Image (cartoon, rainbow, N blue to C red):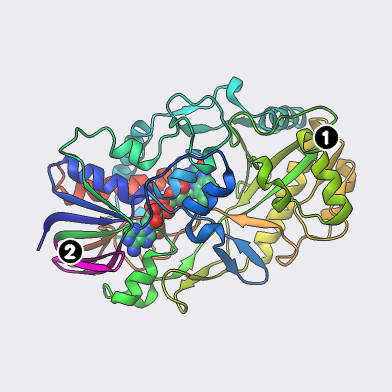
C-alpha cells in the first residue's frame, strides 16, 4: 500500500493551498483532483464544457432556478474565477472568535495577509480595465458613489478578458500557481488528476481513477472538494459526530447583471472584466462589481427572445455590463439523491434578499445611465425589462422582483460544513480527517470568498505542521 503523510482531495482554493504548504513543510503529500489539468482555449464554450463542473449546468432550485457554476480541474474554481480579492470583513472574523472556541481572529488575520502575498494581489491599473468597467466607474463617480478598481490575484495581467474561461496568458494567480508551482520540483505534492476521493477514515484514503479503486495509507486526509461536494462525502461516509448537519447552511451570494446599450462601441471583449467594485452607499450587503460575457455566450445571458433578442445582439459591440450580488439571509442545502456527481442544491432567496437585489439593480442602472447608456436591460424575465432612463428603470423595479423572474446566477457556494456547526476551529471532522474549502465558511460573507478560503487553508496547514508552517 502506498503511504503519504497527507492526502488532500480537491485542488481549488482550499486544497492546493493546504497541499502546497504541507509539502513545503516536509510532508509527503498526495493531491487528488477529480478533473484534468487546466488548459486555456479560444472558445468560452469549450472552456465551460471542460472546466466547469457538470458542463456548467449546476444550479440551485427553489422558487426559481439559479445557475451555480463551480470549477472542475486543477486549480478548481480558481481556474475559472475572476481573480478579485477582498479581505474577510473584520466584524465577521471577530464574531467567529466570539462564537467558536479556539478560533483566533489575530491568527486568521495574519493568514489573510499571507494569502494576499502568495497571490501577488494588486489593484487593477486603470489602463487594463474593460471598456464596460471604465464607463460604469465614471457613472458611479458622477452619482457621487465611491467605486474603485478592485484588488486582484495576478502577475502580469494584460486584460485578455478570459479570466472565467482559464486565463490564456497564465497571469491570473490560481491556487496551483500560487501554492504548487513555486515549490522546487521534488518537494511538490504528488498530483493525481482524474482521481476522485471516495473514502476517508482514520489512517487511510480510498481513491477512484477510472475503473480502478485504490486505498492508500494517509497520516491525515483533507476534504477540499468544494461546498457542493464535500458535505455529500461527509454524509455518505458519516464523518464526525455532526455529519448529519453537513449540507445545510448553504449561502450563495445571489447575483445578477445588467446590460447598458451605449451610442459608441464599448469593446466588451477586452480588458479586465471584474475590474471595478462598489458598495451600495445605503446598504453594505449589496456589492456591485464589473462582469463581462464573452461574445459567444452573450445571447444565452440576455433575458430576451425573438426580435428584441436579435436587435440587442446586433448591437453587441455597444453593450456594457455590470453586476451585483447580495450578502444573503437565505440558507439552502445540498444533498445527493441522484448520486454525488449531480448534487441537488435547494435555495430560495428571502424577501429581504430580493429587495436588496432590486435595490442593487436600481443603482447599477443609475450608474449605466449616468455613464451615457441609451437603454438598460434589467436581469428580469418579464416583458417590460428595458428602460430608457433612470426614472423608467426605477419605476420598473418599484414593485420589487421575484425569484421566478430573476435571471440571476450565484458564484459563491459556502457554509455547508460550517465552522461551529460541523467542524470546530481545528477543522477536524474525526481523528485524521479534516475539511478545508468554502464549506467551512460559516456564514454569508458579502465579499468574494477566495481570500477567506485560502486563509482557512493556510491556518490548517500551519496547525497540521505543528506550528512550523
Ligand atoms: C465564474 C466564477 C467567478 C468567481 N470569481 C471570484 C473572484 O473573483 N474572487 C473570489 O474571491 N471568488 C470568486 N469565485 C469563487 C471562488 O473561486 C471559489 O469560492 C473558490 O475557488 C472555492 O474554493 P474551494 O476550495 O471551496 O473549491 P473549488 O475551488 O471549487 O475546488 C474544489 C475542487 O475539488 C475537486 N473535487 C470535487 N470532488 C472531488 C473528489 N471527490 N475528489 C477529488 N477532487 C474533487 C473539484 O473538481 C474542484 O477542482 C468565482 C467563482 C466562479 C464560479
Is 207 magenta? The answer is: yes
148 lies above or below 174 = above
Circle 1: is it few (<14), some (14-19), or many (20+) Cα within 10 Å? many
- Give the x, y percent position of residue 460: 25, 51
Choose between 232 and 168: the one closer to the eye: 168
Whether residue 88 is visible, yes or no, is no
Choose between 301 and 119: the one closer to the eye: 301
Residue at label 1? 373
Q: Quadrant of the N terminus?
A: bottom left
- Sequence order check: which comes first, mark 1 or mark 2? 1
- Look at the magenta stretch and give its main secondary structure: strand
351 lies above or below 312 = below
Tell me where residue 406 sits by quadrant. Answer: bottom right
Circle 2: is it few (<14), some (14-19), or many (20+) Cα within 10 Å? some
Under tag 1, what secondary structure? loop
Whether residue 201 is visible, yes or no, is yes
Residue at label 2? 432
Tell me where residue 292 sits by quadrant. Answer: top right
Part of the protein shown in magenta: 196-217
Q: What numbered label is drawn on residue 3?
A: none
Residue under the point 52% across and 47% down = 47
Residue under the point 54% across and 53% down = 411
Cα separation, mark 1 vs mark 2, equals 57 Å
Choose between 194 and 467: the one closer to the eye: 194
- Give the x, y percent position of residue 375: 86, 40
Residue under the point 46% across and 58% down = 414
Asked whether, in this view, residue 369 is left or right of residue 458, the answer is right
Amino acid at each position: 500500500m502506498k503511504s503519504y503523510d497527507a492526502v488532500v482531495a480537491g485542488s481549488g482554493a482550499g486544497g492546493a493551498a493546504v497541499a502546497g504548504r504541507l509539502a513545503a513543510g516536509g510532508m509527503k503529500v498526495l493531491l487528488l483532483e477529480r478533473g484534468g489539468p487546466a488548459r486555456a482555449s479560444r472558445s468560452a464554450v469549450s472552456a465551460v464544457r471542460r472546466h466547469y463542473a457538470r458542463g456548467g449546468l449546476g444550479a440551485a432550485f427553489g422558487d426559481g432556478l439559479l445557475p451555480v457554476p463551480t470549477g472542475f480541474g486543477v486549480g478548481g474554481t480558481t481556474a475559472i474565477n475572476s481573480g478579485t480579492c477582498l479581505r474577510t470583513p473584520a466584524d465577521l472574523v471577530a464574531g467567529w472568535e466570539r462564537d467558536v472556541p479556539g478560533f483566533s481572529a489575530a491568527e486568521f488575520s495574519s493568514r489573510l495577509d499571507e494569502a494576499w502575498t502568495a497571490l501577488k494581489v494588486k489593484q487593477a491599473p486603470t489602463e487594463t480595465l474593460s471598456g464596460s468597467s471604465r464607463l460604469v466607474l465614471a457613472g458611479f463617480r458622477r452619482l457621487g458613489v465611491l467605486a474603485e478598481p478592485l484588488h486582484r490575484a495576478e502577475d502580469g495581467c494584460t486584460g485578455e478578458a478570459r479570466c472565467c474561461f482559464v486565463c490564456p496568458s497564465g497571469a491570473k494567480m490560481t491556487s496551483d500557481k500560487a501554492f504548487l508551482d513555486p515549490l522546487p520540483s521534488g518537494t511538490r505534492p504528488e498530483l493525481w488528476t482524474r482521481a476522485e476521493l471516495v473514502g476517508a477514515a482514520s489512517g487511510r484514503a480510498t481513491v477512484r481513477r477510472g475503473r480502478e479503486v485504490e486505498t492508500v495509507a494517509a497520516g491525515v486526509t483533507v476534504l477540499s472538494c468544494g461546498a457542493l461536494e464535500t458535505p455529500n462525502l461527509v454524509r455518505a461516509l458519516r464523518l464526525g459526530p455532526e455529519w448529519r448537519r453537513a449540507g445545510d447552511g448553504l449561502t450563495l451570494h445571489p447575483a445578477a447583471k445588467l446590460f447598458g446599450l451605449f451610442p459608441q462601441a464599448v469593446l466588451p471583449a477586452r480588458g479586465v472584466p471584474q475590474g471595478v467594485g462598489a458598495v451600495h452607499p445605503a446598504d453594505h450587503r449589496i456589492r456591485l462589481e464589473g462582469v463581462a460575457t464573452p461574445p459567444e455566450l452573450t445571447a444565452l445571458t440576455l433575458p430576451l427572445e425573438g426580435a428584441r433578442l436579435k436587435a440587442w445582439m446586433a448591437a453587441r459591440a455597444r453593450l456594457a455590463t455590470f453586476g451585483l450580488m447580495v450578502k444573503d439571509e437565505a440558507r439552502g442545502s445540498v444533498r445527493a439523491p441522484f448520486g454525488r456527481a449531480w448534487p441537488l442544491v435547494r435555495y430560495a432567496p428571502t424577501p429581504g434578499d430580493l429587495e436588496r437585489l432590486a435595490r442593487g439593480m436600481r443603482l447599477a442602472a443609475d450608474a449605466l445611465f449616468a455613464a451615457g447608456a441609451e437603454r438598460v436591460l434589467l436581469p428580469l424575465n418579464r416583458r417590460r425589462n428595458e428602460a430608457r432612463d433612470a426614472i423608467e428603470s426605477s419605476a420598473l423595479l418599484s414593485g420589487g422582483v421575484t425569484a421566478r423572474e430573476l435571471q440571476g446566477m450565484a458564484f459563491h457556494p459556502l457554509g455547508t460544513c460550517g465552522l461551529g456547526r460541523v467542524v470546530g476551529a481545528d477543522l477536524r471532522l474525526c481523528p485524521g480527517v479534516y475539511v478545508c474549502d468554502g464549506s467551512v465558511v460559516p456564514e454569508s460573507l458579502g465579499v468574494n470568498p477566495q481570500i477567506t478560503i485560502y486563509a482557512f487553508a493556510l491556518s490548517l496547514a500551519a496547525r497540521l505542521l505543528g506550528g512550523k508552517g
